[in-house]
Image: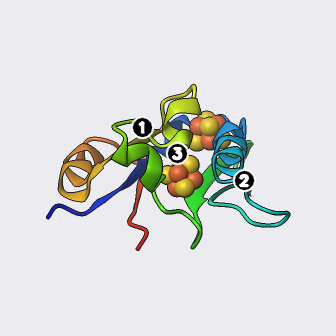
């Protein structure tokens, strides 16, 4: 059976944190528990400062098993207005990733 995961095209990420909120609400996580986290990475180039937002999943991501079983998209996918996050079979995500620099695939257990 195909293994599913998330492709996060962080080049498009605006750092809005909606994915974190949606995930937390969906799972009713307690304080400190998160399924996805967005870090801000600041780096200084020769002529300007760059800010990159880096979303990544944690050990608590279950790929929204209840939602996907019911045919819905994971909560983070649904609420990301920048459409950075794609859910699907990892083999398909890898094909998309070939065309999208600055992206990562996450394959939670
Ligand atoms: S797939 Fe579901 S559990 Fe995983 S990060 Fe997204 S919202 Fe959270
Ligand atoms: S919801 Fe989308 S744009 Fe907003 S922080 Fe998460 S991945 Fe980035």
The residue drawn where x is 48% and y is 30% is 83
Taking the image as shown, residue 99 lies to the left or right of residue 58, namely left
Count residues near mark 2 (Cα–Cα under 10 Å), then give few for <14, some for 14-19, many for 20+. few
Query: How far is the residue under mark 2 from the one under mark 3?
Result: 25 Å
Quadrant hosting ligand 2: top right
The residue drawn where x is 66% and y is 41% is 22
In percent of width and height, residue 100 lies at 33, 42
Q: Earlier in the sequence, mark 2 or mark 3?
A: 3
The residue drawn where x is 65% and y is 48% is 52
In percent of width and height, residue 108 lies at 43, 68
Q: Is mark 2 within 8 Å of ligand 1?
A: no
Query: How far is the residue under mark 2 from the one under mark 1?
Result: 17 Å
Figure quadrant of the C terminus: bottom left
| Residue 91 visible, this angle | yes
Residue position for label 3: 10
Figure quadrant of the N terminus: bottom left
In percent of width and height, residue 17 lies at 72, 41
Rendered image: mark on residue 28? 2
| Residue 102 visible, this angle | no
Judge whether 82 appears above or below 100 on screen.
Answer: above
The residue drawn where x is 26% and y is 50% is 93
Labels 2 & 1 near each other (Cβ < 8 A)? no
Residue position for label 1: 73
Using the image as rendered, state which of residue 87 and residue 65 is in the foreground: 65
Using the image as rendered, state which of residue 33 and residue 97 is in the foreground: 33
Residue furthest toward the top?
A: 81
Taking the image as shown, residue 71 lies to the left or right of residue 85, namely left
Labels 2 & 3 near each other (Cβ < 8 A)? no
């Amino acid at each position: 059976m195909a293994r599913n995961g998330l492709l996060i095209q962080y080049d498009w990420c605006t750092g809005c944190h909606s994915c974190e909120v949606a995930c937390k609400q969906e799972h009713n996580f307690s304080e400190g528990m998160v399924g996805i986290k967005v870090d801000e990475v600041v780096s200084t180039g020769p002529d300007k400062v760059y800010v990159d937002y880096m979303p990544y999943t944690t050990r608590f991501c279950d790929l929204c098993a209840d939602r996907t079983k019911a045919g819905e998209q994971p909560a983070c996918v649904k609420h990301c207005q920048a459409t950075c996050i794609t859910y699907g079979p990892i083999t398909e995500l890898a094909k998309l990733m070939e065309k999208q620099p600055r992206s990562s695939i996450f394959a939670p257990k």
